[in-house]
């Protein structure tokens, strides 16, 4: 499922119900969490590679998921044990959180599975 600011129509991978995404990120029928993933497309030219884009993509996703659940940064910080200012810097794309930090954030936001994959834009 790709997350955007508009209301996305999603299909539950378990019961196949087509529905608008809810704030809690779960299916209306079976209450299964939707799979959330970030897919990065690497540029064809490595000289154009910008090391900032993964930080910006991850930060934007964290901000959208947190906002959709009506959660403040302070509340997310309390649930994860990660300092609020670090979460703020993550959301602004200034730092890339560790895998452990991403797992804590995902759990606090009610995301059961997170798949991170990178592929070339030529494929």
Image: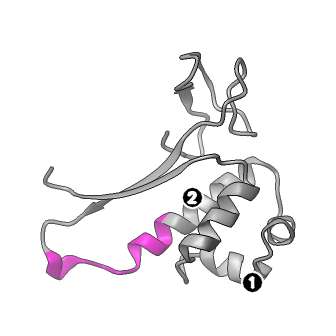
Quarter-wise, where is residue 97 in the image? bottom right
Say which residue appears at 72% left-offset and 22% top-offset: 28
| 95, above or below 114, in the image | below
Quarter-wise, where is residue 42 in the image? bottom left
Residue 53 image offset from top left, x and y in percent: 40, 72
Q: Secondary structure at mark 1?
A: helix
Q: Nearer the viewer, residue 100 or 121?
A: 100
| 101, above or below 18, in the image | below
Q: Is there CB contact under 8 Å for labels 2 and 1? A: no
| 51, above or below 111, in the image | below
Instruction: Please give the label number shown on residue 85.
Output: 1
Which range is magenta?
46-57
Q: Secondary structure at mark 2?
A: helix
Quarter-wise, where is residue 3 in the image? top right
Say which residue appears at 52% left-offset and 65% top-offset: 58
Residue 78 in the magenta stretch? The answer is no
Q: Label 2, on which residue?
A: 61
Residue 50 image offset from top left, x and y in percent: 31, 79
- Cα–Cα span, label 2 and label 1: 17 Å
Say which residue appears at 64% left-offset and 81% top-offset: 89
Dot 2, crowdedness within 10 Å: few (<14), some or many (≥20)?
A: many
Task: Return the disc, 2 or 1, that comes first in the chain's sequence.
Answer: 2
Dot 1, crowdedness within 10 Å: few (<14), some or many (≥20)?
A: few
Residue 47 in the magenta stretch? The answer is yes
């Amino acid at each position: 499922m790709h997350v955007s600011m508009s209301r996305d129509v999603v299909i539950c991978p378990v019961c196949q119900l087509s529905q608008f995404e809810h704030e809690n990120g779960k299916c209306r029928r079976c209450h299964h969490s939707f799979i959330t993933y970030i897919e990065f497309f690497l540029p064809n030219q490595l000289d154009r590679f910008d090391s900032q884009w993964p930080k910006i993509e991850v930060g934007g996703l964290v901000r959208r998921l947190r906002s959709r659940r009506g959660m403040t940064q302070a509340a997310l910080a309390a649930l994860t044990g990660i300092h609020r200012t670090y979460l703020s810097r993550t959301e602004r794309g200034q730092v890339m959180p560790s895998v452990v930090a991403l797992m804590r954030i995902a759990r606090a936001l009610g995301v059961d599975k997170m798949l991170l994959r990178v592929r070339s834009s030529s494929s």
